[in-house]
Image (cartoon, rainbow, N blue to C red):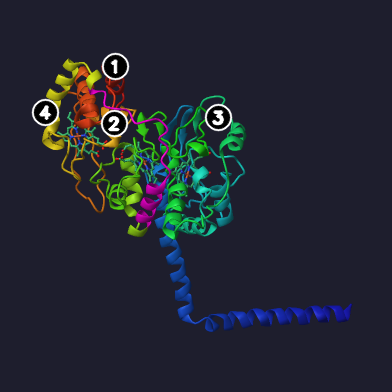
Amino acid sequence: MKTRSILFFVLLLLLAALGAGFYFLYPRAMPRTDHAEVVNATTQIITKGEYLARAGDCVACHTAAGGKVFAGGRPMPTPFGALYAPNITPDEETGIGQWNADEFYRMMHTGISRDGTLMYPAMPFASYTKVTREDSDAIYAYLMSVEPVKLQNRPHELKFPFNNRELLLGWRTLYFKQGEYVPDTKQSAEWNRGAYLVQGLGHCAMCHTAINALGGSSESKAFEGGMIPNQNWYAPSLTSNREAGLGNWTIKEISDLLQSGVSHRGTVYGPMAEVVYNSLQYLSDDDITAMAIYLKALPQRDSEPPPTSQARLVNPAVMELGRRVYTTQCAMCHGNEGKGQPPEYPPLAGNQSITMASPVNSVRMVLNGGYPPGTKKNPRPHGMPPFNHILNDEEVAAVVTYIRVAWDNSGTPVSAAQANELRKVMPE
Ligand code: HEC
Ligand code: HEC
Ligand code: HEC
C-alpha cells in the first residue's frame, strides 16, 4: 500500500517535471521563425483554398442576392420545387463551424452530410467527388477563415415525394460514381489538369449535360448539352461542332471566352456569363489554358450529317421581314454580313451558338438583350439592348430566322409561337 502510493507520488512528480519542462522549454525550443513558417504555411493553404473555391464557384449558390458571402439562402428552382443552399460560413450554430476536415471531405467526396443525411445533387458533389483530399482540405481551411455569419438555413420547399431523401438512394445507384480524379497517363500533364478542373471543381457537366427526368446525367452523355431546368436557357453541347464543340477553335479563342467572357468566335451570356464572372475570370492563365486544351480535345460526337441551310424553305416574306429588321436594328453592331466586330460585338455568321438546333438562346438574347460579364481582362464589356418592346413576335421570329439561315448559316426557321413563349419568361 505504502510503496504503491510512493510510486504514485514519484510518477506525479515526474509528470509535473515533464509538464514544467515542456512549459519552460517548449517556447524556447521553438525558434520564432518556425512559428512564422507555420503561419505562412497556413496562409498559403488558405490562399490556395480561396482559389479552389473560386474554381468550384461555391459562391454562386451559397450566396443570396444582396446577402453575405457564403451565408446561403439563395433559392435554386428545380422541377421538383425550390432548394435553398445552406450557410457555409464557420458560424458554430447556423453554419459549418462544427465540421472538421474529415467530415468536409466526406461531404465533397460522397455527398453525405455531417449528420449522415444524403444530399441532393443540386450540390454538385457528383463532380466534386473528383477533388483530391489535399484540395478539399485547402477549401475547408479557407472556409474556416472567412467571417462567420449567423443566419439560419431556410428549409427546402420540395414537393412530395421529392422531399423524401430516401429517394436519393435510387438516384445515387443510377447516376453517382464516387471517386477522385485518376490521371490518364497517355495524356499530357496539362490535359490532365484541365480534365481535373472541368470534370471536378468546374462542375461544367451539371449544366452541359442533358438532365433526364430523374435529375441525373449519365456519364455516356457527358457534355452533350441540355435545357437547364426552370431557367429556359440551353447549355450547348461541348462535344458537337454544330453546337459549342470547340474542336475547331484555337486554344487562344477558348481561353479568351472562358477567362474574359468575349472572344473572336462568340461571347458568353446568361448563366454562362455568371460562371465566368464568379469563377473562371479568377483562374490563372495556366489553368485556363489547361482547360482549353482538354475541352478542345473532347471527342466530337456528330453522328448525323450537318443540316444544310434551309433558307430556300423559308417563306420569302418572312425572309424579307427578317432582313429589314436586321438592317435597321442589328447591322450597326453585328455588320451587314454578320461578321460582327469581334471581340466586342460577336459575329453571327458561322457562329455555332446561333445555328444549333435549339433557338432558345438567340430568341432570348433578342428579347432581353445582354451584357457579357465585366472581367479582369475585359472590365467594360459592350452590351446588347433588349428588343422586347420594339419588335413583335412575328418580327422576333423573322429576325432570328434570318440570322439562322443567312450568310450560309445552317440553322432552321423559328416560329412566332416560340418567340411568344419565351417572351413570357422574365429576364434573369
Ligand atoms: C449549383 C449550386 C451549388 C454549388 C456550386 C455549391 N453548392 Fe454546396 N450546396 C448546394 C445545395 C443546394 C446544398 C444543400 C443540399 C441538401 O440539402 O441536400 C449544398 C450543401 C453544401 C454543404 C452542406 C452544408 C450543411 O449544412 O449541410 C456544404 C458544406 C457545401 N454545400 C459546400 C460547398 C462548397 C465548398 C462548394 C464549392 C466547392 C459548394 N458547396 C458549391 C448547392 C451548391
Ligand atoms: C450554370 C450552368 C452552366 C455551368 C455550370 C457551365 N455552363 Fe457553359 N454554358 C451555359 C449556357 C446556358 C451556355 C449558353 C450561353 C452562352 O453561349 O454563353 C453555355 C455556353 C458555354 C460555351 C459556349 C460559348 C459559345 O459562345 O459558343 C462553352 C465553351 C462553355 N459554356 C463552357 C463551359 C465550361 C468549361 C464550364 C465549366 C467550367 C461551363 N461551361 C459551366 C451554362 C453553364
Ligand atoms: C448595340 C449593339 C448591338 C445591337 C444593336 C444588337 N446586338 Fe446582338 N449582341 C451585341 C453584343 C455586345 C452581344 C454579346 C452580348 C452578351 O454576351 O451578353 C450580342 C449578342 C447577340 C447574340 C448572341 C451571340 C452568340 O454568340 O450566341 C445574338 C443572337 C444577337 N446578338 C442577335 C442580335 C440581333 C438579331 C439584333 C437585332 C435585333 C442584335 N443582336 C442587335 C450587340 C448588339
The residue where tag 2 is placed is 355
Across and down, in percent, residue 408 comes to 22, 31
State which quadrant residue 387 falls in: top left
Alpha carbon separation for disc pair 3 and 4: 52 Å
Instruction: Please state which of the two labelled residues, at mark 1 or mark 2, is closer to the viewer.
Output: 2
Residue that carries the numbered disc 4 in the rendered image: 327
Q: Which mark is drawn over residue 203? A: none
- Residue 303 shown in magenta: yes
Q: Is residue 33 left or right of residue 4?
A: left
The residues bearing labels 3 and 1 have C-alpha atoms spaced at a distance of 35 Å
Gap between marks 1 and 2 measured at Cα: 19 Å
Q: Give whichever of discs 3 and 4 has the lower sequence position.
A: 3
Q: Which residue is mark 1?
A: 417
Q: Is residue 283 above or below residue 161?
A: below
What amino acid is at disc 2? Thr
Q: Could you tell me the amino acid type at mark 4?
A: Thr
In this picture, is 285 found above or below 365? Answer: below
Residue 66 coordinates in the image, percent (x, y):
33, 41
Q: Are marks 3 and 1 in contact (CB under 8 Å)?
A: no
- Residue found at the far right of this picture: 1
What residue type is disc 1 on? Ala
Mark 4 lies on a secondary structure that is helix
State whether label 1 is within 8 Å of ligand 3.
no
Whichever of labels 1 and 2 marks the residue nearer the N terminus, that label is: 2
Query: Which secondary structure lies at badge 1?
Result: helix
Segment tinted magenta in the rendering: 287-311
| Alpha carbon separation for disc pair 4 and 2 | 19 Å
Q: Secondary structure at mark 3?
A: loop
Q: Is residue 60 magenta?
A: no
Q: Are marks 1 and 4 in contact (CB under 8 Å)?
A: no
